[in-house]
Image (tube, rainbow, N blue to C red):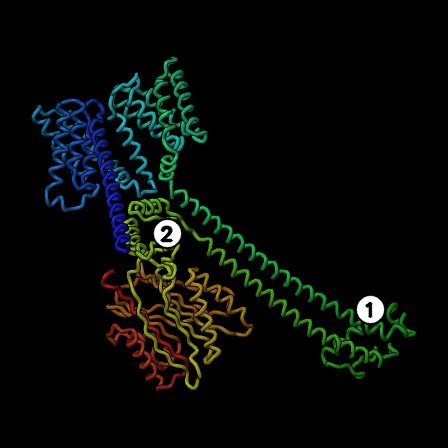
């Protein structure tokens, strides 16, 4: 029983495979037959009664795309001969045969034909046959002009037909239509129209019916623009194929435009618009009721349009503008999102700025209230001591100013001596006041309370002032973030379309392509596509395609965890790096210090750049290490995120100022290397000189500036240098140069030390410099010492 079951399943599988193979063969046969029909019709296309290089150009476009071009040669020749046996027909048949023979030469057959190769072959073959024909008939100048014209037409037609044939051959796998392919299809269909039979059935011109169907169909799919363009092309070529007829061109153009304009009303609406436009144009041109395009032919064409399946129309509409609209929508939403983000950040910045102003105003008003507090102090003493006195009216009404001045003098004595005693008072005051002891006691008590309250009020004011400064600092940081986001980014739609089209030709389904040109001219390509199922199309195929289109090497920089998930592949391509960096470090903590106060970093950052940073905290030990660590960590985070270098420096400077009111600062020695272009930006903030060891010597880089955390704004000078293969960048802290004897120039000493050692190993050079510096200091590190050496080298494969 099991044997029978397995036998049955085996037979079923074989039958299915036979049916599948048979179905594929039938589809291939139909496909080949359609191409033969196209070659036949294009062979019949003639303009100006004797110019017919179109069949030859189409045959040449098919040669590199099909293994057996002989069948298509026969189809083109039959199409030519169907026009009649004329000498010019035989001339084109001979040209097609000449191209076939050329394609079968073993050397030529093994090579891949480019479009340029094909076009030049057609142009040369047409010139050769035309000149030979003219020579046999008797050479005339007109023949030379005609030969040149036909060769140019044939050459151009190869560029028109090649993308059309690519589209037709791979129609089942294509989902996107490029603009140049759309133009090529229009010209191709117009030429097919004039190659159609001049046969009339039941009083109908098959050529006119075919032309009207094409205009109606494409107007309904693509709208007024496509309808007008195809109508103009068909009318133009029909006019060139017969007698010149400008009216025919105008009628087809206007009818196609109106049919496309009313496509939202359905196929019936487009057909009715075509009919009415034809009637209007006829009446406008010749005031006749006999239409230029017969009504019966338009009616039959409209019925044929209704017979086209909805699925076929939706597919053609999708392929007309698929992908491009999604890319444009994505770009528009990305731009809107950027504008919204920048706007929100600016609003947040304004909020913090307003809060800072509010705290500042509160502090100022409290200063004013502090002056008023002295007046209240006098009122308290007067009400407590003087109110029950018999001489109150005499002191505070008749002699107010004298009494007020005497009381104010008491406050001055209290501020000066801290406590009021009777012997400190003037003789006049003692004679005038009968409660001197009570006044002294009350003034001392009230003033002591006043001083206590004033001290706390001052601390509160200081806290408010500090909060105002911090809020203002946060406002500036957020403003700089908004400015960084609002950078100049241009979307390259032409490159997006080219990449989409090329990947579509290769059968790679892409959801979205975004090509960005940054402000510095760098190109970045972001692609989202369906998951490739682990076939690694992302790196094997797409990277090569993008590099060929952009004409520069590109590399995939996506996170490995996101490259190929189960649902989709998310890819980011940037310009490939031409250079690599190798770094060596030598460090020495200050004598008796527990840790080294210097910190360093050597890491790749965004967009093919590499960061070298060396920071020296104030003093030595753990506190200096903490300050330099903050500087290095923040530089790494900001620059890895892609922020501007100057904005990053200003932000970190603001953070250091806000962290503490003490004098805490740190130096920063930065070098940002562009691994794509081979250049470096040096920025020094309180740091000593940097040295570049080259084949022909050592260059010194200087850029004086104060350390971070001192001034609110840093004026950092950017020094740009071009790097070469083998260059070594030497960065040191001041402890290394300060180890040299005071009578020796430290920079000249460093240049001499670097020059004497011939090595390509950065670690060896770093150790050598450290050892020489310790020798100068008798083996004792009087300050933290750090040497960082980075070598720039170009891989052999780049």
**Residue farthest to the top?**
288
| Residue neighbourhood size for the residue with mark 1, other residues' Cα within 10 Å, grouped as few (<14), some (14–19), many (≥20) | few
Q: At which x and y percent is residue 671?
A: 37, 66
Residue 673 visible at all: yes
Q: Position of residue 517 (x, y in %)?
A: 37, 51
At x 38% / y 39%, what residue is drawn? Answer: 318
Residue 193's x, y, as percent? Answer: 27, 26
Instruction: Determine which residue is flagged by label 2.
Output: 530
Where's the C terminus, which quadrant? Answer: bottom left
User: Could you tell me which secondary element the residue under label 2 belongs to?
Assistant: strand
Percent of width and height locating residue 254: 38, 24
Is there any visible trace of residue 677 in the rendered image? no
Q: Give above or below for 466 relative to 322.
A: below
Q: Is residue 92 left or right of residue 736?
A: left
Q: Which quadrant, please, contains the N terminus?
A: bottom left
Residue extending farthest to the front is 1
Answer whether labels 2 and 1 touch (C-beta < 8 Å). Answer: no
Residue 196, compared with residue 665, is above or below; it is: above
Left/right of residue 660 with respect to residue 8 in the rendered view: right
Task: Name the residue at 41% across, 74% down.
Answer: 599
Which quadrant holds residue 629?
bottom left
Residue labelled with disc 1: 401
149 w.r.t. 574: above or below:
above
Q: Nearer the viewer, residue 210 or 519?
A: 210
N-terminal of the two: label 2 or label 1?
A: 1
Residue in the foreground of this view, choosing between 132 and 780: 132
Query: Badge 2: few (under 14), some or many (20 or more) residues near its Cα, within 10 Å?
Result: some
**Residue 391 numbered mark, or none:** none
**Residue furthest toward the right?**
390
């Amino acid at each position: 029983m099991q044997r029978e079951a397995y036998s049955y399943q085996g037979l079923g599988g074989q039958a299915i495979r036979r049916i599948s193979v048979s179905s594929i063969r039938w589809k291939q046969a139909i496909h080949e037959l359609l191409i033969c029909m196209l070659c036949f019709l294009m062979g019949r296309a003639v303009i100006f009664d004797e110019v017919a290089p179109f069949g030859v150009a189409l045959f040449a476009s098919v040669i590199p795309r099909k293994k057996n071009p002989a069948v298509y040669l026969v189809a083109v020749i039959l199409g030519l001969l169907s026009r009649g046996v004329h000498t010019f027909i035989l001339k084109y048949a001979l040209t097609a045969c000449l191209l076939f023979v050329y394609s079968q030469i073993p050397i030529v057959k093994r090579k891949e034909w480019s479009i340029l190769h094909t076009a030049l072959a057609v142009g040369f073959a047409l010139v050769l046959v035309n000149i030979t024909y003219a020579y046999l008939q008797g050479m005339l100048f007109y023949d030379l002009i005609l030969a040149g014209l036909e060769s140019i037409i044939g050459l151009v037609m190869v560029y028109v037909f090649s993308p059309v044939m690519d589209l037709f051959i791979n129609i089942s796998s294509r989902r996107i239509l490029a603009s140049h392919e759309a133009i090529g299809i229009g010209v191709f269909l117009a030429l097919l129209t004039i190659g159609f039979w001049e046969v009339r059935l039941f009083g109908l011109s098959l050529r006119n019916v075919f032309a009207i169907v094409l205009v109606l169909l494409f107007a309904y799919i693509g709208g007024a623009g496509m309808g007008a363009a195809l109508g103009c092309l068909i009318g133009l070529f029909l006019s060139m194929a017969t007698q010149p007829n400008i009216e025919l061109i105008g009628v087809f153009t206007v009818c196609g435009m109106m049919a496309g304009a009313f496509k939202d009303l359905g196929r019936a609406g487009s057909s009715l618009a075509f009919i009415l436009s034809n009637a209007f144009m006829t009446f406008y041109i010749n005031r006749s009721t006999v239409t230029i395009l017969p009504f019966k032919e338009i009616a039959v064409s409209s019925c044929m349009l209704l017979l086209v399946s909805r699925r076929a129309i939706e597919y053609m509409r999708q392929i007309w503008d698929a992908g491009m609209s999604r890319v444009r929508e994505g770009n528009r939403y990305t731009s809107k999102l950027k504008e919204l983000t920048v706007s929100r950040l600016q609003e947040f910045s304004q909020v913090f700025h307003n809060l800072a102003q509010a705290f500042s105003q509160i502090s100022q008003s409290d200063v004013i209230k502090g002056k008023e507090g002295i007046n209240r102090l006098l009122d308290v003493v007067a009400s407590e001591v003087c109110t029950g006195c018999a001489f109150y009216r005499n002191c505070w009404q008749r002699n107010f100013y004298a009494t007020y001045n005497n009381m104010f003098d008491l406050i001055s004595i209290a501020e000066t001596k801290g406590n009021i005693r009777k012997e400190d008072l003037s003789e006049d005051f003692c004679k005038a006041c009968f409660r001197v002891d009570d006044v002294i006691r009350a003034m001392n008590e009230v003033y002591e309370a006043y001083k206590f309250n004033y001290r706390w009020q001052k601390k509160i004011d200081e806290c408010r002032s500090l909060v105002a400064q911090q809020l203002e600092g946060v406002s500036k940081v957020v403003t700089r973030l908004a400015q960084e986001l609002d950078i100049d980014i241009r979307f390259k739609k032409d490159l997006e379309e080219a990449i989409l089209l090329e990947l579509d030709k290769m059968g790679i389904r892409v959801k979205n392509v975004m090509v960005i040109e940054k402000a510095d001219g760098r190109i970045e390509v972001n692609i989202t596509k369906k998951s490739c199922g682990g076939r690694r199309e992302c790196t094997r195929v797409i990277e090569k395609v993008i590099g060929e289109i952009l004409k520069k090497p590109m590399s995939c920089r996506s996170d490995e965890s996101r490259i190929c998930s189960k649902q989709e592949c998310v890819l980011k391509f940037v310009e490939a790096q031409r250079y690599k960096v190798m770094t060596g470090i030598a460090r020495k903590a200050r004598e008796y210090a527990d840790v080294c106060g210097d910190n360093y970093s050597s890491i790749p950052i965004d967009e093919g750049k590499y960061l070298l940073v060396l920071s020296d905290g104030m003093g030595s030990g753990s506190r200096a290490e903490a300050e330099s660590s903050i500087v290095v960590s923040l530089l790494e985070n900001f620059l890895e995120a892609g922020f501007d270098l100057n904005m990053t420096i200003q932000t970190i400077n603001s953070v250091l100022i806000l962290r503490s009111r003490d004098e805490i600062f740190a130096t920063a020695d930065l070098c940002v290397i562009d691994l794509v272009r081979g250049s470096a930006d040096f920025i020094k903030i309180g740091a000593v000189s940097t040295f570049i060891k080259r084949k022909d010597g050592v260059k010194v880089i200087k850029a004086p500036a104060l350390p971070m955390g001192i001034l609110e704004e840093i004026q950092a000078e950017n020094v740009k240098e071009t790097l070469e293969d083998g260059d070594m960048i030497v960065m040191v802290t001041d402890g290394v140069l300060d180890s040299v004897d005071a009578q020796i120039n430290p920079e000249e000493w460093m240049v001499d030390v670097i020059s004497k050692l011939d090595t390509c190993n950065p670690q060896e050079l770093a150790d050598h410099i450290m050892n020489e510096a310790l020798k100068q200091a008798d083996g004792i590190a009087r300050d933290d010492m750090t040497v960082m050496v980075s070598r720039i080298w170009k891989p052999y494969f780049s």
